[in-house]
Image (cartoon, rainbow, N blue to C red):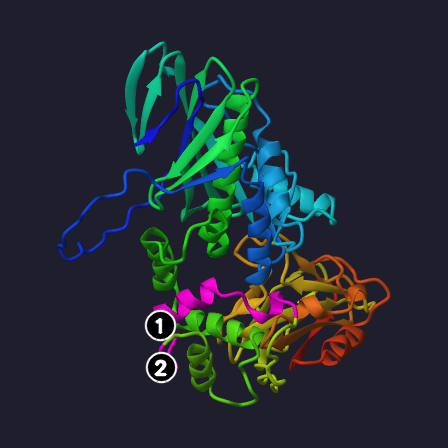
Amino acid sequence: MVMVPRRALAALLSVGLVTSCMTPPEKAMVAKQPSTAPARTVSSFSEALRCMDDLLWTHGKRDIYITSNGIPDETGRLLGGTKEMVITSVSRMADKSNAFSFVDFEPALDSVNALYWMVGVRPEFRAPSYYIRGAVTQLDENVLADAASAGISLPKVDLSVSQDQIVSVISVDLSVGELTTRRILPGVTASNSIAVVQSGKGADAGGIINKAGLSFQVSLSRSEGMHQALRTLVELSTIEVLGKLTRVPYWQCLGIEQTNPAFMTQSRDWFDEMSESERQAYAQRVLQADGYMQGNEPAAAALGRWQADHDVIATGRMDFDTYQRMLSSPTAKAMPASGVTKAAAAPPPAPDVVLSSGRGPQPSYRVGEALSVRASTTADGFLYCYYADAQGAVSRIFPNRFQPDAFVEAKRQVEIPPGPQPPFNIRMEKPNATETIACVTSPQEVGLALPEKYKAADLQVIPQTGLDDVLAAYSSLTKTTVKSSRMAVKVLPAG
């Protein structure tokens, strides 16, 4: 129970996380149990948002396009402005990392056709991949008022109040969905509550994250107490849902240890949901970033050396203990060069890429028909594909705003554009001509290392650039390996 001193305002903030099942410890003599949870005083979660920016950079999260139509007040009793609160929170998390870009997409999110219309009419429009939705689901005003001395018990909240105090409770629920499919991502949710206690003079606010057992004491002014309490909920909820979306250890930014049972359960769930190839790919990314991959050395040997250097049993296998240690350890790419520098290692070979189409590896299309590209790699790696029309104009077609992740698992076929009702088309225009698809693969995310002149937006012509220029730019990159493949597309007259 958190005690509220006389003539003070207090608020309790609780994050609705799924409670893990713990094995009861062996019985032992207990002299005395702690009576209060650890407390931390903050003015807002601005510090945690800056921490998330660093964390997202450390884990290599880039260019995730998201949107939101705001967080409506289902109670009808609070001021607006929640969309701006979300935008501010997202922007602070992407200041240096560029992990997120917020797309101000005003039409109703249910109108996916409006999204496609925007792409067609305004080619520079960047379509978001995800959207944040939610609502203010509870506002219980004056839960307890004018009590000389009393107590109140709410879900995950216990308060004691003194004379001349009023308690109000606000709850916010957030979730993240895929924009094109309208699927709400399981587990990527947050449900938070804050109990604001008002008294005659001034205002104080505090909170408790129930699973972590950490109490946040947040200062509020009396004039804007409820509005600032709502902003606090939005900031914390945005950290939580975007941390879950990107699968980074967001709890570190709240001052919670990696060994906390609640968040060990969270990372365990992430590990269990990964396929074996995804686990190996994650391990390779960390090993490459930390400089442990040396030439054609077996991945197991490199992993064993990493484990030995990071106090994990050196089995050479990607187990949960290794994943959790990697999750909580900053990688070399995010840290300045200091201390012991590892010797430069030869980069691993790039996978081969296999190109085909909806009409095979040597396709013919008539004028006006739409091309469907099929690409796969012989090993896990990063894939970048370009289209050159009959006049030689070049555009990047993968990754794109609808398929934002360049990472491709071994032998998994990627269809460009995706789906039976593709969000964009590659149509043949000039008869009796040849158009070209070229794809580049690498074991590393080399697209970010290209010279700026080649980094035009997806599906748009790269100015004054030919296909050979783009492929040469990839081949000239150092500290990596690349392979490329081309597919000629013959264009027939309209039939």
Q: Within the magenta stretch, is there residue 13?
A: no
- The residue located at (35%, 78%) in the rendering is 313
Q: What is the quadrant of residue 152 in the picture?
A: top left
- The residue located at (35%, 68%) in the rendering is 320
Indicate the position of residue 481 as horizontal and vertical percent values. 64, 82
Q: Can residue 320 be seen in this snapshot?
A: yes
Q: Within the magenta stretch, is there residue 323?
A: yes
Identified by mark 1, the residue type is Asp
Q: Is residue 400 or residue 48 the one in the foreground?
A: 48
Q: What element does badge 1 sit on?
A: loop
Magenta extent: 313-336
**Tag 1 near tag 2, CB within 8 Å:** yes
Tell me the crowding category of disc 1: few under 14, some 14 to 19, or many 20 or more residues within 10 angstroms, Cα based. few
Indicate the position of residue 372 as horizontal and vertical percent values. 60, 64
Q: Is residue 104 or residue 215 the one in the foreground?
A: 215
Name the side, left or right, on which 324 lies relative to 458. Answer: left
Tell me the crowding category of disc 2: few under 14, some 14 to 19, or many 20 or more residues within 10 angstroms, Cα based. some
Indicate the position of residue 134 as horizontal and vertical percent values. 47, 34
Q: What element does badge 2 sit on?
A: loop
Q: Is residue 388 or residue 160 the one in the foreground?
A: 160
Where the C terminus falls, by quadrant?
bottom right
Question: What mark, if any, has residue 315 been given in the picture?
Answer: 2
Identified by mark 2, the residue type is Thr
Q: Compared with residue 348, is residue 424 higher up or lower down, i.e. above or below?
A: above
The residue where tag 1 is placed is: 319
